[in-house]
Amino acid sequence: MNNKNINTNTVWATEKEAADHYKIKPATLRKHRSLYGHDGSLFYRKIGGSVRYNLDTNDRQLEVNDLRIPTSKKERTL
């Protein structure tokens, strides 16, 4: 078996990596999950107790539907 150092984690990102990618705080992602769960605009999975975000799917979803991640109470009510 070939044991090269291949990064196969290019699609799934930790909460901190996703927050950095979207230029928001990790707490905003946690709040979004808490409010919307899996019905929200972000695709995520819990893997072994940690949350992973699929950046490719989320980027496409946000772009195609012209969505953004709500960051304030005012935006959530719109």
Image: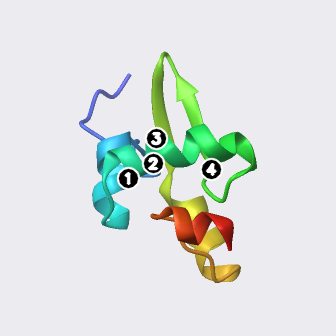
4 and 2 marks in contact (CB < 8 Å): no
Distance between the alpha carbons at the discs numbered 1 and 3: 11 Å
Please tell me how crowded label 1 is: few (under 14), some (14-19), or many (20+) other residues with Cα within 10 Å: many
Tag 4: amino acid: Phe
x, y percentage for residue 63?
Answer: 60, 80
For marks 4 and 1, the one nearer the N-term is: 1
Q: Which residue is mark 1?
A: 18
Under tag 3, what secondary structure? helix
Tag 1: amino acid: Ala
Residue 7 showing in the rendered view = no
For marks 2 and 1, the one nearer the N-term is: 1
x, y percentage for residue 62?
Answer: 60, 73
x, y percentage for residue 6?
Answer: 30, 41
Figure check: 60 above or below 38: below
Numbered badge on residue 30: 3
Tag 2: amino acid: Leu
Distance between the alpha carbons at the discs numbered 3 and 2: 4 Å
For marks 3 and 4, the one nearer the N-term is: 3
3 and 2 marks in contact (CB < 8 Å): yes
Q: Which residue is mark 4?
A: 43
Tag 3: amino acid: Arg
Please tell me how crowded label 4 is: few (under 14), some (14-19), or many (20+) other residues with Cα within 10 Å: some
Is residue 35 left or right of 52 when viewed as pictured? right
Figure check: 41 above or below 31: below
Q: Give 38 or 52, whichever is nearer the viewer.
A: 38
Distance between the alpha carbons at the discs numbered 2 and 1: 8 Å
Residue 78 showing in the rendered view = yes
